Image (cartoon, coloured by chain):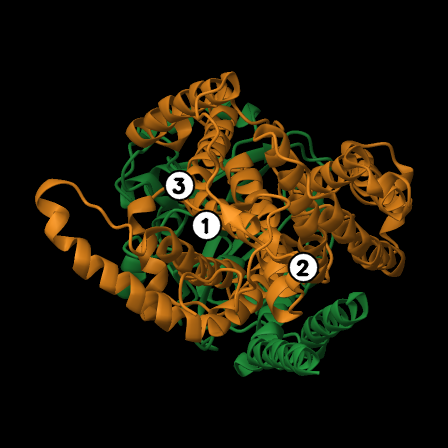
Amino acid sequence: MKNISRRSFFKNSVLISAAALSSSSTAKAASNEPLSEERFGVLVDTTVCIGCRRCEWACKDAHQLENQPVHSYDNRSVLQTKRRPDEKALTVVNEYENLKDNSKPIDVKVQCMHCDHPACVSACIVSAFKKKENGAVIWNGSRCIGCRYCMVACPFQIPAYEYNKAVEPEVKKCDFCYDRLLKDKLPACVEICPAEAITFGKRIDLIGVARNKLKLYPERYFHHVFGESEVGGTSWLYLAGRNFEEIGFPKLGKSPAPGVSESIQHGLFAYFVPPIALYALLGGIMWLNKRKEHSETED
Amino acid sequence: MHEFMHPKQIQNKFLTPGVITLIALALNGLAFLAIRFFWGLGAVTNLDNQHPWGIWIAVDVAVGVALAAGGFTSAALGHIMHKESYHIIVRPALLTALLGYTFVAMGVAVDLGRYYDIWHVMLPPNWNGNSALFEVGMCVMIYLSVLYIEFLPIVCERFIGKVNLPGILARLNRPLDRLLIALDRGLNKTMFIFLIAGVVLSCLHQSSLGTLMIIAGPKMHPLWQTPVLPLLFLLSAISVGFPMVIFESLLASRSFRLKPEMDILSRLGNIMPPLLGIYLAFKIGDMVIRESFVYLNTFSVESVSFVLEILIGFVIPLRIFLSRSLSRTPYGLFIASSLVILGVIMNRVNNFLIAYNPPFAEKAYYPSIGEISVTIGLIAIEILLYRTFVKIFPIISLPGISTKKAKYTIRGMAK
């Protein structure tokens, strides 16, 4: 008895681990819409940003969120604490000390990075998130069931949730002003920025602009374009005068966030072969055991 | 002549001090649930944008699914391996799995922001084959249906020839009786399809539950973040199946004042060392291969939790199950089984809560009084339902009574 159960148990576990391993060699993140070479991006140059927070105002204005009059954003005391985008503000500016020049603090605008291989899109149980061809990662409220797996998955911890709503709570995050882009308008934050710290354009062009800046002013910048390769690349790109990990950016690898989990999923469910094989195997064992018992009772 | 199962309805009194305590806990949980449904998750839970999942997912769902594994492991042993001597454990394990998964579904519904939209998961345009959660969701839904189908023959056995509706409904007695007989005959012929499906579905979602946290990537502590998580989840679920059966059987015998089924239970205990051994081999092997043991050098919540989980939940019970003298006593078996259960609970909580370190968290997550109350309340209701079911349906076999053998343990009247 023990032998049989142990043997079949081994078979099952080997089957499953083999399935998981066979596909991990071809680990690639699948995305449901092909990424356009022409897709948009935004380059944020934090060395130019003056921390006026007009982008915060414009964002709330464009998304019909509860807002304060624009002059109230001149109050810089808000910058004393580190804030995160949440369900009430889809973008916020945080301020960090400038080690090179104390009089010019580093201001960093934070919002959804619009990954090229988004973890939220891969994770969502009802495909409520989509990476659009133009680069935007948007949330479809009519599908969402509120499981918050997107928030578990996001490497930048961006999606926020309306915990205090009993009915129709929403996942809130920057949508790249998707509706404005469709009308050939700039994202609200880009449009309002008085310092031209945020540049909108084709992602591929912006990478060129960023690299050029690094080449021309090597002493001004920390030599890295954040977002060019992080988690497989993001639509939003950053330049800074200080190591990104010191100014609120998470340390991330170059492989897309959903890569490992997707290859396991696809390995376990490759054309439904592993589940069907397991079913057949168990059916076979069941049949053999019953036949054996049958012949024993006949003897 | 073999001694085969003979499940009976339990006749003991329902209301005991323990049951009254459970009812109080259940009401307390329901009160907090009312707050959650009227004022939203934020009114009851300590969840925030950094910590989207709390104990309602880690305990109610992840632990709930793992501890309901007794259903599929005993079905595999009793039906697929066709070991008839184990048949007395199959019905109690089936009921535990049935109630367990029902409460997993309820736990999910409580945690979902839009619980009323849960059916969106079933709509084909919404399907997302990349999502581990989608797979868990689908498998759990189908498996729950399979469990109810597996339970139907017990309903048939209980009510065939005994359908007795009151008043005007009495007219339906005969048609209902015929329906039950037809159902029983049909199920008797097709049950093997569902039995195998139940085991396959369990293997799938038990492992995919492990895939869930992989996408959190570097947000998860390296002691737990590994691509073999699905395998570890499956192996630990298989390891906790029989301890749950032993634990419950011993508790039920005590509660209903029956003689413990020591013969069967110690034989189940004998299967445990290889199961625990294989799990430990993979768990420790994974740690060695990924060299994640370096994190054990630092004294932290994570490293202590990791060591405690392995020692208490797997190493110590393995030693007890290996001991010939200890594993034959009810106490030895009970302690070893409880430790494995505790270990799997710790493992799931560690994976979903302790290991999860969001990058911008200003404070750690601790469950609120409301969250704990709801979790305990749901468990209390589950135990109360178990007690009710074993009084209504023939689930628990009384020791010492032999009967004819059946084609399937969960058969009804059909011959």
Q: Secondary structure at mark 3?
A: helix
Mark 3 belongs to which subunit?
B
Tell which residue pokes out farthest to the left in this image. B168
Q: Check disc 1 and report the residue beneath it.
A: A196
Mark 1 belongs to which subunit?
A
Front residue of this view, candidates A37 and B263: B263
What residue is drawn where x is 47% and y is 45%?
Answer: B99
Q: Check disc 3 and report the residue beneath it.
A: B392
Q: Secondary structure at mark 2?
A: helix
Q: Are marks 1 and 3 on the same chain?
A: no
What residue is drawn where x is 60% and y is 67%?
Answer: B79
Q: Colour of chain B?
A: orange
Q: Secondary structure at mark 1?
A: loop
Q: How many marks?
A: 3
What is the three-letter code of the residue carrying label 2?
A: Ser
Indicate the position of residue A251 as horizontal and vertical percent values.
Answer: 70, 50
Q: Check disc 2 and report the residue beneath it.
A: B85
Q: Is residue A126 visible?
A: yes
Indicate the position of residue A222 as horizontal and vertical percent values.
Answer: 71, 51
Q: Earlier in the sequence, mark 2 or mark 3?
A: 2
